[in-house]
Amino acid sequence: MNKFFIFLILNFLSFNIYAETIATIKLSYLIENSIQYISFLKKLESEKNVFHNALRKEEKFLEDRKIKIEDSKILFNEEELKNQIAIYNEDIKLYQEKINKYNNFLNDNMEINQKKLIDEIFLIVKDISIENNFDLVFNEDQYFISNENIDISELVLEKLNHQQFDLDIIHYK
């Protein structure tokens, strides 16, 4: 009997029920549909096209040089041929360094501007959660499935698209 009363007391004490107010957001949806981010991607694509055109010209020039070296094997002595190949290989190395530098430029710009965007989203979600007394706000990486009634992505996107902030291309010197 004594054990029964202890069981009841412990059972009643453990029933502290807290109703948590939860919301969810789809971060990838917000990033993909942000007006500022779409504008940034268009600017970056324009820069990318200019660079790709310049690279294609340089690549064509290098291919033509390779063909000339191949065709000139008969005309050059061994020392001149080695010299031409060494110069060509150095130019290829410089070309590859340009490509790597530009890929880093693209990646850095994407990372920096996504971070700026996520920081803006964080501030908006913070304000919304304070206004609506949300205890928790999860993004799609933090839950498996949720009810659409608790998804505040559209509200966040609306506020995000009315925010004034710039996502700019960062050029390195």
Image (tube, rainbow, N blue to C red):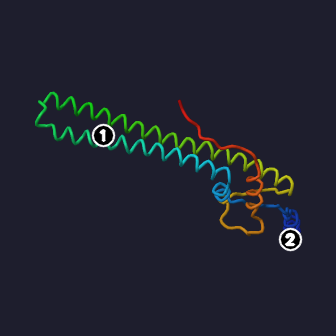
Residue in the picture at 82% in, 50% down: 127
Percent x, y for residue 58? 36, 40
Under circle 2, the secondary element is helix
Q: In the rendered image, which residue does mark 1 sit on? A: 62
Please give the name of the residue rendered at 82% of the width and 57% of the height, measured from the top-left corner. Answer: 134
Relative image position of residue 93 (x, y in whole percent) = 34, 35
C-alpha span from label 1 to label 2: 88 Å
Which image quadrant is residue 113 in?
Answer: top right
Please state which of the two labelled residues, at mark 1 or mark 2, is closer to the viewer: 1
Label 1, residues with CA under 10 Å away: few <14, some 14-19, many ≥20 = some
- Residue 43 place in picture, x, y as percent: 58, 46
- Please name the residue shown 31% across and 40% down the image: 61
Circles 1 and 2, Cβ within 8 Å, touching? The answer is: no
Residue 74 position by quadrant: top left
Residue kind at label 2, given as amino acid type: Phe
Please give the count of numbered marks on the rendered protein.
Answer: 2
Residue 133 coordinates in the image, percent (x, y)? 86, 56
Q: Looking at the picture, tell me which residue is in the foreground, 44 or 147.
A: 44
SS state under label 1: helix
Q: Is residue 106 left or right of residue 83?
A: right
Residue 4, label in figure: 2
Q: Quadrant of the N terminus?
A: bottom right
Residue 52 falls left or right of residue 142: left
- Crowding at label 2, few (<14), some or many (≥20) Cα neighbours within 10 Å? few
Sequence order check: which comes first, mark 1 or mark 2?
Answer: 2
Q: Position of 105 compared to 145: left or right?
A: left
For residue 17, the mark is none
Residue type of the residue flagged with mark 1: Leu
